[in-house]
Amino acid sequence: MATFNKEIRMKVTTTDSFFGSMVRGIYPAVVENSNVLARQISLLEYPLGEYMHCNTPWTEVDHVLMPIRMGVRAHWILGHLDIRNMYINVYNSCSDTIRDREVIVDIQPFAFVIPHLMANIDVGNL
């Protein structure tokens, strides 16, 4: 639980870089047929809170923080999935040198795969 002060309380979990690799790897197949996610047990275990040690199921949190290594650049960005409002914020610490159009290429697989992933595990029925 992330606590900034007594009035602001959020339940947060994270993914790891392997999650990002799996999302990027499965992205072309999901574009063709989203049913392929049902066979991706390791990927499905992330939102269930079963893949990483000390992870929390996405049904029990408000936010998921995702470190994302950019494919072409040797740079990390942070994806912030707001589950309740169904959007992804992206934080780029090098926005002066790495433009939004470059970041969009790396976030697109997440923006496409995550809604299908959440539908597969019924996160949408919060």
Image: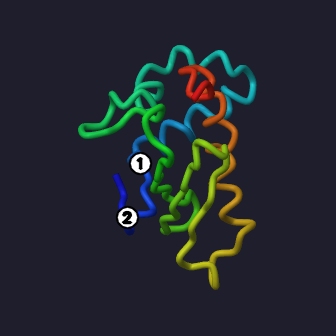
The reply, left or right, for residue 77 in relation to residue 5 is right
State the image coordinates of residue 119 (x, y, percent, origin top left). Answer: 63, 24
The answer to whether residue 126 is seen in the rendering is yes
Find the residue positioned furthest to the front: 7
Residue at the (55%, 60%) spot, across then down: 70
Residue 24 higher or lower than 40, as above or below: below
Label 2 belongs to which residue? 6
Name the residue tied to disc 1.
11
Q: Residues within 10 Å of mark 2 (few under 14, many from 20)?
A: few
Query: Residue 17 vs residue 78: left or right?
Result: left
Mark 1 or 2: the one toward you: 2
The image quarter containing residue 92 is: bottom right
Quarter holding the C terminus is: top right
- Identify whether 43 is placed above or below 72: above
Which of the pair 113/85 is nearer the observer? 85
Instruction: Kindly identify the residue that appears in the image at 70 percent across and 74 percent down.
Output: 99
Between the residue at mark 1 and the residue at mark 2, the CA separation in whole angstroms equals 14 Å
Query: As shown in the figure, which amino acid type bears the numbered disc 2?
Result: Lys
**95 over 39 or under it: above or below:** below
Kindly identify the residue that appears in the image at 66 percent across and 15 percent down.
Answer: 35
Q: Secondary structure at mark 1?
A: loop
| Mark 1, other Cα within 10 Å: few <14 / some 14–19 / many ≥20 | some
**Left or right of 92 on screen, residue 48:** left
- Could you tell me residue 62's position as x and y percent? 50, 45
